[in-house]
Amino acid sequence: MEALLISACLLGENCKYSGGNNALPKETLAALERRFRLVPVCPERDGGLPTPRIPSERRGERVLNREGEDVTEPFRRGAESALETARREGCRLALLKERSPSCGSGVIYDGSFSGRIIPGEGVAAELLKQNGLAVFSETGVEKLLENAGFGVRNSEL
């Protein structure tokens, strides 16, 4: 069974910045579990940030929390940890939390804490893509299930 790197919050793990989760619907999780061996990661927690934590957003190459503190290094450590896990577990695919400063793929919050969305990548999503993983967000789970196992790369999606 193919391994799928997945944001732990999507599995219902309470590791979201607020202390909650972003659990996918049960039927979606069941479909994923039938097709994949799920490998959970939380780059923010794995990089050393607490749960709950002050919300953060990416501003260019830096990540700042709402109080203005630069938290880029824990985000980078978490991204490296996610990549290490993906390599160890043989993951070629990842399903990550959209808009997140670590896991967002294609769009992220703009860094103003106003809810504005811009094109961009979270720190972990960017590193995983640079290292050949196909990265999907939870709104693309159907596409993931359709394309799984066919050697699809990000450039082909």
Image: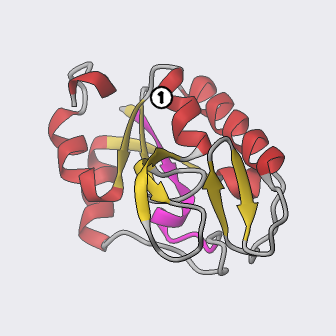
Residue drawn at (52%, 60%) of the image: 110
Residue drawn at (63%, 52%) of the image: 59
Q: Residue 42 placed where, x, y %?
A: 64, 54
Vertical arrangement, residue 86 with respect to residue 142, above or below = above
From the image, tell me which residue sits under label 1.
129
Lateral position of residue 90 relative to residue 151, left or right: right
Residue drawn at (52%, 40%) of the image: 125
Q: Over which residues does the magenta segment extend?
A: 3-14
Seen from the viewer's position, the closer of residues 79 and 11 is: 79
Lateral position of residue 72 relative to residue 99, left or right: right
Quadrant in which the C terminus appears: top left
* Mark 1: amino acid: Lys
Residue drawn at (33%, 62%) of the image: 29
Quarter holding residue 77: top right
Whether residue 144 is in magenta: the answer is no
Seen from the viewer's position, the closer of residues 77 and 42 is: 77
Colouring used for the render = secondary structure
Seen from the viewer's position, the closer of residues 115 and 149 is: 115
